[in-house]
Amino acid sequence: MKILNLSLGQDTGGQQMRLQAAWPKYHPEDEYLSVTSTKTFYEIKHRYNLATLTKVQWPNADVVHLNNDLRYIERFRRLNTRGKAVIVHHHGTMFRTRPDYHLQALKAYRATAIMSTVDLWAMAPEQTTWQPQTYDRRELAKYRKLHDDDVLKVAHAPTNRAIKGTNALIKAVDRLKAEGASIELDIIERKPNVQCLIRKGQADVYVDQMLLGYGCNAVEAWGMGIPVIAGVDAERCPDTIFQSIPLDTRDRMLQLWGKMPFMESTEEGLYESLSKMLSPTVRKYWADRGYAHFLRFHEASTSTSALRAIYEKALGT
């Protein structure tokens, strides 16, 4: 199978980079090529070139894995999809703000849609599939560094403080400090992924977001054996991120997973959640639960096999 993973935008969350690295290890019979056109925090070896794309990469591919949109095909009329499996991989805002447009495009191009997060899948569960992000547990383990003091180190890496509930987290940590708790907060912002991993690997707890469930940061934490605090609040999303997710998103998560892999919290509940995480026993419980979820869905051999099955189905093989 020859697979072309193409993005004309950012490599969202480093997913293209990690698939490119993992695929030869677990599916050496295939040819996997990730191509992007923009600079990114993640290493992409193959850069976009229109002539190479249209004359070599696209014509030779059995599977064309596009990211966020099908406009590539509309933009380049010469790109023929006949005989190819077309996959569109949605990562967030573009689908949430225009789901009807994207679902119509799926029908028009007979494409298969996969979703990076469950809140996206919950918007169209009959037409799409949740595809967990791919991570190498051995690679993540390299960044884990335990410390021997009694300070609870909390990591948090917001791309947008309002969306991630950062101010509420700061207030919760400050309150615990005022009460005498040994706790430190490391807010990681605007840093390359490697630096983020190094700092995250020194944490005892990772706090993700309180609106959409978990994202890539939580997966990285679980792969390092770090417990995660996160939450789902569909009712608050429209006023906070000006986007909507289905009210049954949490139920959909339980449908897929059976149980939540993170300690659930709201912004208002972060003080109580962090208070519980002061206990090593509680931290170990949630670290083990998160790591089990990581192995079940996100570990590279598991997630790439699930994705390959999607490719095969789209090809009709």
Image: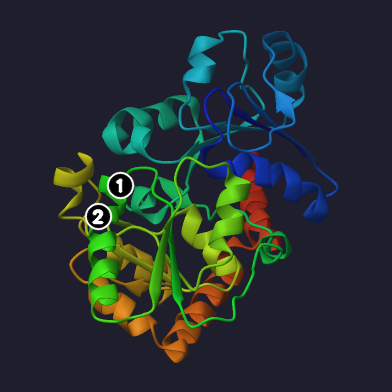
Q: Are marks 1 and 2 in contact (CB under 8 Å)?
A: yes
Q: Residue at x 30, y 47 (%)?
A: 161
Q: Quadrant of residue 298?
A: bottom right
Instruction: Using residue 155 as the reference point, say whether residue 45 is left or right of it.
Output: right
Identify the residue position indicated by label 2 in the image: 167
Q: Position of residue 192 (x, y in %)?
A: 57, 41
Residue type, numbered disc 1 = Arg
- Extreme right residue here? 29
Within 10 Å of disc 2 (Cα), the crowding (few <14, some 14-19, many 20+) is few
- Front in this rendered view, residue 88 or 39: 39
Residue type, numbered disc 2 = Asn
Q: Which numbered dot is residue 161?
A: 1
Q: Residue at x 78, y 17 (%)?
A: 56
Q: Position of residue 19 (x, y in %)?
A: 68, 45
Compute the Cα span from label 1 to label 2: 7 Å
Q: Which numbered dot is residue 222?
A: none
